[in-house]
Amino acid sequence: MNKQKPDMKFWGLWNLSFGFFGVQIAYALQSANVSRIFATLGADPHSLSYFWVLPPLMGIIVQPIVGTLSDRTWTRFGRRIPYLFIGAALAVLVMCLLPNAGSFGLAVGAAMIFGLIALMFLDTSLNMAMQPFKMLVGDMVNEKQKAKAYSIQSFLCNAGSVVGFIFPFLFTWLGIQNVAAVGEVPDSVKWSFYMGAAILILCVIYTVAKVREWKPREYAEYNELTNDDFEDDIKAWYEQKWQNSSLLKLLLLRFKFTYWLENMMGNNWIVKYFKFLNSWVYLLFHAPSTFWKVGLVQFFCWAGMLYMWNYTPGAIAEIVWNTTDASSAAFQEAGNWVGILYAVQAMGSVVWAALLPSFKNTKVAYSVSLAIGGIGFAMVPFLHNPYTQFIAFLLIGCAWAAMLAMPFTFVTNALQGYGHMGAYLGLFNGTICLPQIIAALLGGIVLYLVGSHQSTMMIVAGVLFLCGALAVTFIKAEKA
């Protein structure tokens, strides 16, 4: 029986997550400006969603790897923090390159390819930096305080978002140019990314200085310390499933191939790679039902968020500024205003996150929040004044607050006693990334179906959120 994890003081919980503030500034700059950057470079609106495939694709690859590797890592600096620091350092470098994609004298196609590669590395590094914060809470915070810890993460996430979102508007107000030559990103956006990079690395340095992870013996006192390779369990499970289930044999061929390779080649890096993948399959088959039910809710919500990030700049330019010309001053002004609207959404999220603990039933709170957000999305195409858009985005912020805090509370509570917390949370990230990939691949088709109006995609996002609100009813909450 493991010892009960001790209660942490507020500032201990705060320090555990403070670096999240810097990471989220970077994410805010990415989510608010990527479509604007590629539209400025010359991308067609119907192909715009394809640029959003790579970020979640890298997330679905990187986060399980970081989770699984950090479960097996013990260094003098900790097990999660080394990944956090390396990811942040890489993100800083790429944040200085991405907004300059149109400034190197490249042809339009080459500039977009450069930007796409930079975006891929940016999202990879941010995923690498973000995931350890969630794992630190799972490692070190007891069940009673876990909701509070994730609420602090939610607050820091939204505070960072506000800062990142308003940067282009702020720098334009300070006199930095918001219009550039055709095919180039304005200086207001470039300097926003530079400032975000500086804050990111400072926040991560603060976390590294203030947080002391438990050593292996101390960790084992409070957590179920399992055999990280659990190879015997995997082999026994594989043998049983191979004998008893013909439906799974195609999937289980991966295991058979791995063991054949091991007999032929020994336990080299290729075999270790396949064992790595096998362990994920094993964990997914043994995941609690809550893992999958929350994942269904996540599917609808994150598909809706992808459409928001992808199409809001074009939608606001179309609805409020009456332009679809990405090279015009009006379009760039609309792009700045999108940052303000996202900041309003984040501030609404902060307020709503403070109210969420007052709900006695977390499922009701989760479902109501998503439904309110769905209504907010549906309002966007009908509000032609830039300030009345605040109403819609405040409502969207209610859903965002619930999306940030509640899924991980449900899942980490359900995972108690399962072990391999980092690997499971990395795999759970697939419920964030996979729906975005699917939504991005279908975005151009859906845009055609709704008359090629980017504003109508906000209604599509609203319908997805309402579906997510209904899916919450399938979740069975585990008591902390």
Image: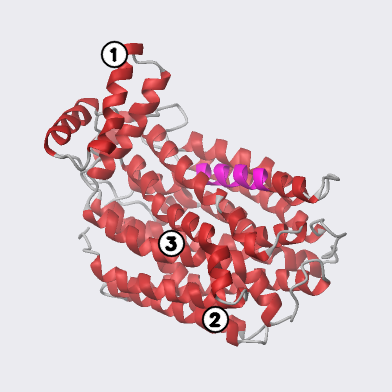
Which is more N-terminal, label 3 or label 2? Answer: 2
The residue beneath circle 2 is 392
Q: Is residue 289 left or right of residue 117?
A: left
Location of the N terminus (image quadrant): top left
The residue beneath circle 1 is 263
Q: Position of residue 227 (x, y in %)?
A: 25, 28
Residue 174, relative to residue 97: is it above or below? below
Residue 158 appearing in the image = no
Prevalent SS, magenta region = helix
Amino acid type at circle 1 is: Asn
Amino acid type at circle 3 is: Leu
Residue 473 appearing in the image = yes
Bounds of the magenta segment:
116-129
Residue 283, relative to residue 25: is it above or below? above
Q: Position of residue 15 (x, y in %)?
A: 48, 50
Amino acid type at circle 2 is: Ala
Q: Is residue 323 left or right of residue 61?
A: right
- Judging depth in this view, the residue of 54 and 372 nearest the camera is 54
Graded by Cα atoms within 10 Å as few (under 14), some (14 to 19) or many (20 or more), the crowding at tag 3 reads some
Point 51% across, 75% down: residue: 348
Q: Is residue 455 left or right of residue 254?
A: right
